[in-house]
Image (cartoon, rainbow, N blue to C red):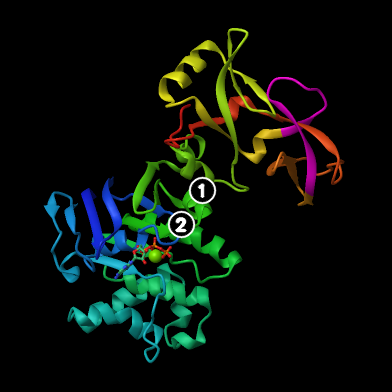
Amino acid sequence: MVRVKFDSVSKDYGNVTVVDNSSFEVKDQEFFIILGPSGCGKTTTLNMIAGLEEPTSGNIYFDDQLVNTMAPEKRDVAMVFQTFALYPNLTVHDNIAFPLKLRKMKKELIEEKVAAVGVKLRITHLLEKKPYQLSGGERQRVALARAIVREPRLFLLDEPLSNIDAKLRVHMRAELIALQRELKITTIYVTHDQVEAMTMADRVMVMNHAKISQIGKPLEVFHKPANLFVAGFMGTPPMNFFNAELKNVNSHQVVANEFFTINVDKAMGDRISKSTTGGELIVGVRPQNMQQVTASGDAVFEGEVYAVEPLGIETQVDVKLGDSIYKFVGPAEYKSKMGDKIKVKIDTSNMHLFDRKSEIALI
Ligand SMILES: Nc1ncnc2c1ncn2[C@@H]1O[C@H](COP(=O)(O)OP(=O)(O)OP(=O)(O)O)[C@@H](O)[C@H]1O
Ligand SMILES: [Mg+2]
C-alpha cells in the first residue's frame, strides 16, 4: 500500500542523539522488523513514521511524498503501542468502532466493518464484553482489530506481543503474519526479541545505540552478521568470541591465540590481512558449531568442563578456557562431568572473524 523511506534521519533530545543518521527503505507490503536492545531508538523511529515526533534532520517519505511535518491523522497510519490501551468503559464493539465514529462514518457501514474485522480476528464472541473481562491475548486481538478496522495503508506495531505469555505469543506471531499476508498492508514491527525477528520478518533492521547495525533477510543477518554486535545479538545461546591474531607460522598463515591455532588458506589470509587494521581479531563461533573431540589438531582447544546443562534434546556445556567461559552444544547423552579436561573443536567452515578495533566482520 505504501513505501516508507528514511533519508539520513536523525532525532535529538536536547544534546542526545537517539536516532543517528538513519537511512532505510521499507518496501510496499513488506513485513519489516526493527530489532534492537532497550533504548536503541526503535520506538522513536516508529514515532517519527507515525508523525508523533518530528525528525531533527533528514527526510521521511511515504512513496514519493515528503511527510516530515504531516499531521499523524493525515498519514493514514495505524499504530499499536507497546502498552496497548483499550478504552475501559467501552465494550469491545465500541472500542473497535471508535476510530470509525471519529471519522463520522455511517452507522451501517461501521457495523459492517466491525463485524468483518471481528470475524477476521476471531473475536465475534467478545464484542459485547468490556476489556477487563478479556485475557491478555484477547485484548491484544481487540487492539489489532481497532487498528486495522479503518484499513490503513501502513501498520505500525511496537512490541505488541511483549505483554502476552510465551505460549500465546507463539500463536499470535503466526496469526499476525497470516493477517498481514491477507491484508497486504505494509507493516513495520518493533521488537527486542530476536526470535520474533527471525520468524516473522521479510527483512530485519538491527539497531544499536541509535544507529543501524545491519539490514537484511533474517537468515542473511543470522549467517552473515556485519559486525560483532549483530553476531552477539542474533542466536541462542549467543555466539562465543575468542581474541586471536593473524600470524605467520613456518610461512603459513594462521589465526591463533594461546589456546588454539586455526590454519587459513592463502586467499583467506590475504583477505584478512588486507581488511584488518592491526591483525588483532575476534573469532566468533556459535555454540552449535563447536563439538567435543578426542584428538588434538587444527582448531582444537583444551579446556575444563565448568557446567553441564542437559535440556533433553541436547546438552549445553560450559567450558573454561583461561579466565573465560565458552558454551557449546553437545549431544543429549553427554558423558563428561564438571572438572573434566576435554578437547573442543571449532567448525572453521562456520566461524566468523571480526576486526577487534572496528568490530566489523572480515569474512
Ligand atoms: N521524549 C523524550 N525525551 C528525552 N529522551 C527520550 C525521549 N523519548 C525517548 N528518549 C530516549 O531516547 C532513547 C531511545 O528511546 P526509544 O524509546 O526509542 O528506545 P526503544 O529502542 O524503543 O527502547 P525499548 O526497547 O526499551 O522500548 C532512550 O535513551 C530514551 O531514554
Ligand atoms: Mg520502545
Residue 148 in view of the camera: no
x 37%, y 89%: residue: 90
Q: Main secondary structure of the magenta part?
A: strand
The quarter of the image that holds ligand 1 is bottom left
Q: Left or right: 319 with respect to 288? A: right
Q: Is mark 2 within 8 Å of ligand 1?
A: yes
Confirm whether the magenta stretch covers residue 269: no
The secondary structure type at the circle numbered 1 is helix
Q: Which residue is mark 2?
A: 37
Q: Earlier in the sequence, mark 1 or mark 2?
A: 2
Q: Position of residue 164 (x, y in %)?
A: 53, 70
Badge 1 vs badge 2, beta-carbon distance below 8 Å = yes
Q: Nearer the viewer, residue 136 or 82?
A: 82
Farthest bottom residue in view: 89
Residue 95 at least partly seen: yes
What stretch of residues is rendered in magenta? 291-307
253 left or right of 156 in image: right
Pointer 2: residues within 10 angstroms few (<14), some, or many (20+)? some
Q: Which mark is residue 233?
A: 1
